[in-house]
Image (tube, grey):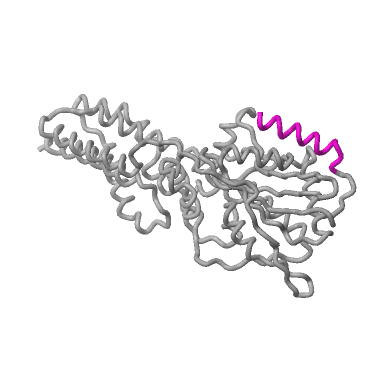
Amino acid sequence: MRYLRFLFLYTLLYIGGVAHAFRADSVEVSLLTCSPGTEVYSLYGHTAIRVKSYTTAEDWVFNYGVFSFNRPNFIWRFTRGECDYQIGALPFAYFAEEYEERGSTVYQQVLNLSASEKERLWTLLVENMRPENREYRYNFLYDNCTTRARDRIEEAVEGKIIYPEQDTVRTYREIIHQYTAQHPWAELGNDICLGAEADRPISVRDEMFAPFYLLRYANDAVIQESDGSTRPLVLSQSEVVEGRDVEIQKEFPWSPALSAWILFFCVAGLTVVERWRHACFWGIDIFLMSLVGGIGLVVTFLFFFSVHPTVGSNWQIWVFNPIPLVAMPWVVWCAVKRRKTYYHPLNASVLILFMFFSALIPQDFCVVIVPLALALLLRSCSYWISYRKKEK
């Protein structure tokens, strides 16, 4: 419904006379920043551009974050990193109503643009609204609703926007963690998928993929004219929609780290009992190898086939890969039949090497990788020790 409504409003906006004479002297242009919501796709907030005319009473919000879950093959295209977003436009009243219902705060920064700069920005936005121009290939870190809004403003300015320097050096992952701090399982999903590229130091411009970093830097930014003079980019900041406390959806009561370590100690305890009783608890292997192999399917697909940012530099693929899932039937059959398999020494060797060299790898690993790797290592070592004893 949201998608159809945006398309309807787009038609109303474009056909109803967007290209009418633009009176820049009576227009106010603002950058809107929306606080995060509770849904996974809204955890990072949102950015839009508001154009308000005091003579015609038109008040439009241009939004580069329009998408629809109902588009053909949306999940597949999103997983591949080939999801197309588009610009939409709707009256500010509707935009404000939507975020008020979510309980989000909407901050407005009135931009200090000249009449010609406002007109140029309007022209750029209207040009983006054309059917042949309105879609773009979304990229979470490098090309999203926030970077698009920033880029249009920079294109409109007659001069150059100078942003303040960083107060500290950050990485993409550190910024993402700021937004997912209260959603540990969503954070785990990100950390499983993101690779080493997410842990490199980034610039001020890179940080502005996140809405509130653009808000922060815009507040202290200046426009440098061709003669060297400067003026502030932002005239004023205010709240145009007041947020409210929204109950965070309850996730699994245990954190990912706690859950993974509990699983490890359960595996360790059952393995001790298994060896003591000379039994074969093959169900442990089915569960553990299915879990790690399932995660590995996702990581491996993203690593080799997705164009999402940073996923192709994920060193966790040495632990999270489909090999346990593929090998599981053979491993379980050998365990039940008490037969030796070289999977276990090979698996143990890879896991030991990974953990030994992990401190040298320039990547922050997810919180579950160590307990899961130790659980797999324990099972392989247990089987291999058992085989060695039988051979003596």
Q: Quadrant of the N terminus?
A: top right
User: Is residue 39 magenta-colored?
Assistant: no
User: Residue shown at 35%/31% (left/top)?
Assistant: 290
- Percent of width and height locating residue 364: 41, 53
Judged left or right of residue 135, residue 217 is left
Please give the name of the residue rendered at 31% of the width and 47% of the height, measured from the top-left corner: 370
Q: Is residue 312 left or right of residue 134?
A: left
Total numbered circles: 0
Q: Nearer the viewer, residue 349 or 95?
A: 95
Against 382, is 199 above or below? Answer: below
Let me know if residue 14 is in the magenta part.
Answer: yes
Q: What range of the chain is rendered magenta?
A: 1-18
**Looking at the image, is 25 positioned above or below residue 15?**
below
| Residue 197 appearing in the image | no
- Foreground: 274 or 165? 165
Pick whichever, 143 or 16, lies toward us: 16
Judge whether 277 appears above or below 381 on screen: above
For the residue pair 75 and 354, the one nearer the viewer reads as 75
Q: Is residue 155 left or right of 220 when viewed as pictured?
A: right
